[in-house]
Image (tube, rainbow, N blue to C red):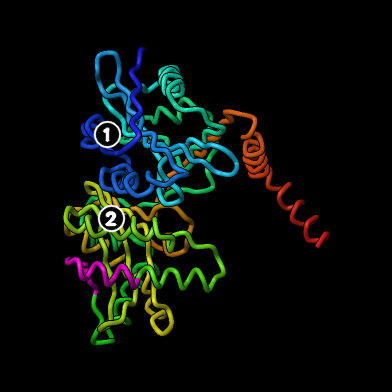
Amino acid sequence: MQYRVTIDRSWDAALPRWQALLSGPVFSPFQGEAWLSHWYRRFGARPDVEPLLVHVADRDGRDVLALPLILHREERGRTITFADLGITDYNAPLLGPAAPADEAGARALWRAIRAKLPPADLIEFTKVVSTIDGRPNPIALALPGKVSNLFGNYVRIEGEYEDWLRSLAKDNRKELGRFWRVFTRDERARFVVAETPAEVETIYAGLAMQQSERIAALGLPYLLDEPDYAAFYRDLIQDGLKDGSARLTALTAGDELVAALYGVAHGDHYAMVRISTAGGPWANCSPGRLVIERTMDALHRQGFRNFDFTIGDYGHKRSFEVEHIPLLDIHQAASWRAWPTIGYEGAKAFVKRHPGLARLARRVLRRAA
């Protein structure tokens, strides 16, 4: 099969070629036009990022796929990776009707793409999905990968929302009801769906502050306070208010923000990307879990069916009895500068397959300390 590979360096240049693929089935909102357009326009101008918007057509001009990639210049070298920078939870191509579904075809496709990509030291594709709308991901077929430590989490509600609630384990179901009763003992208590720019700005500012304070209290590094990231999320939610591609919901008590939830949407798929809580005296109503449940109820009434808790293994996700989405990590050396990374990733994978080694290493390190 002969492929015609085109690489654009900006979102606006790529859009005419990508439009049909963006209008078809995509894996998640992270492959939707709203997320990708804001991502490239915000981060594509950074000096360490070179956008690589890959489009492939077959010899008859049919769409094969589109790949949202970048060349990322770092201290360790030049890395070709997805448009991510730590905030895209699932990485996947957009598939066209001519995408190959077999390993040989996928490898031929990757060879054509690789020949057009710029020089790099490392190919690093993380959080990669293996199937898209029931079809195999050609990138996962073509390149050897390892099962990621990360996985997605989702709930699919096909029928009535109340029927889904009744399907939960008794303890989980009763807790959700109790949380709402405890919260609404305060006569000021409200569940809010932000519907105006002013509401969005107020709730988003509170969410950002609560998240930042929580991470600082834990002594952890925090990415989302950086100007590019803060502006990205602010622009995305303000524009999403117009077309429904981003949603902001909250629990409030008068002027106090008790909890806030930021999600992105595409079709009937809603993905949660940021959550914050006030804590303190509100902890007894588990405001994080409560704002999620109230949001699911409200969005289900609007036609949403796939509720995506995204990556991360947290207790509040397990309490909603989520199903897992397995993900892959792919690392390929393209020059000698990538050898340390490849060796490190290989060692991690080896230890994961042999947990006894990990326990031995921990014992040795404790003795050395």
Q: Residue furthest front?
A: 47
The amino acid beneath tag 2 is Leu
* Residue 76 percent location from the top left of the image: 60, 41
Please determine whether, in this image, residue 94 is positioned above or below residue 41: above
In-front residue for pair 163/300: 300
Chain part drawn in magenta: 191-206
Determine contact: label 2, label 1, CB under 8 Å: no
What's the mark number on residue 236? Answer: 2
Please determine whether, in this image, residue 292 is positioned above or below residue 229: below
Disc 1 secondary structure class: helix
Mostly what secondary structure, the magenta segment?
helix
Which residue bears the numbered disc 1? Answer: 13
Q: Earlier in the sequence, mark 2 or mark 1?
A: 1
From the image, which quarter does the N terminus lie in? top left
The residue that appears at 51% across and 28% down in the rendered structure is 119
In-front residue for pair 200/170: 200
The residue that appears at 36% across and 30% down in the rendered structure is 54
* Residue 137 percent location from the top left of the image: 39, 31
The amino acid beneath tag 1 is Ala
Please determine whether, in this image, residue 270 is positioned above or below residue 6: below
Of badges 2 and 1, the one in the foreground is: 1
From the image, which quarter does the C terminus lie in? bottom right
Disc 2 secondary structure class: helix
